[in-house]
Image (spheres, helix red, strand yellow):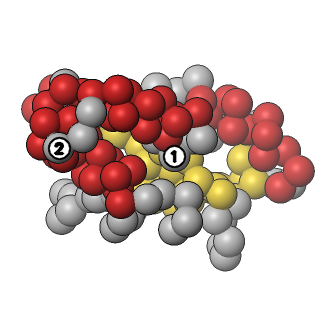
Amino acid sequence: MDILDEFDIKIIKELEKDGRVAYSTIATNLKISNTMVHQRINRLFEQGIITGIKPILNEKQIGYDWASFTGITLNKDSDSDRIIEALKEIPEITECYYVTGSFTLYLKITAKNHEHMRRILYEKIDNIPGIAKTDSMVELGCAFKRNVSL
C-alpha cells in the first residue's frame, strides 16, 4: 500500500460516499487545502488508481429485471480478442472477465425480462463465431457490492 498514503485513502473514501462531492467539501472535511485535494485526485487518475467517477444505475428501477452470470467456452482461446470485441457490441453485457476453469470468459448480462435474456443469449451471443457454448446462472439480487478495503 506504499502507493497510497493516508490522505489519498481519506480522499478516496470521501469520493466513495458521494462521487459528486465538491473538492472544497473534501478539503474542509479533511482539514487540508483545496489545492491538495485537486492535486491528489489528478494524480490518482493519472496513476490509474481511480479510473472514473460515474453514476451507479439501479437496473431494476429502469426496467431491467433480469440478470445472469454467463460462462463462455470458446472453440479456440486464441480467438478471445476477436470475440471480446464482438461482445462489446452487445450493450446488455455490462462486465466481461477472463477466468480459469471450465470457461474462458465470464459475463454479467442485464435484460428487461426472460424473453429479452433469451434473445441476447441465442440471437446475439450464440451467433458470434468461435463460441462453443454458454452456461448461465440467473442472478436473483445483489446482496452487496463494494470496492476493496483501503
Disc 2, SS: loop
Q: Earlier in the sequence, mark 2 or mark 1?
A: 2
Q: Which mark is residue 134?
A: none
Above or below for 101 versus 107? below
Residue 15 found in image quarter = top left
* Residue 81 placement (x, y as % from top left): 79, 40
Above or below for 113 versus 62? below
Residue type at numbered disc 2: Lys
Q: Which residue is mark 2?
A: 31
* Res 31 seen here: yes
2 and 1 marks in contact (CB < 8 Å): no
Residue 20 found in image quarter = top left
Question: Does residue 48 appear left or right of residue 65 in this picture?
Answer: right
Comparing 49 with 29, the one in front is: 29
Q: Which residue is mark 1?
A: 49
Residue 136 found in image quarter = bottom left
Q: Residue at x 67, y 76 (%)?
A: 101
Above or below for 74 versus 120? below
* Residue 128 placement (x, y as % from top left): 70, 35
Q: Quadrant of the C terminus?
A: bottom left
Q: Residue at x 78, y 46 (%)?
A: 80
Q: Residue at x 57, y 41 (%)?
A: 48
Comparing 43 with 59, the one in front is: 43
Residue type at numbered disc 1: Ile
Closer to viewer: mark 2 or mark 1: 2
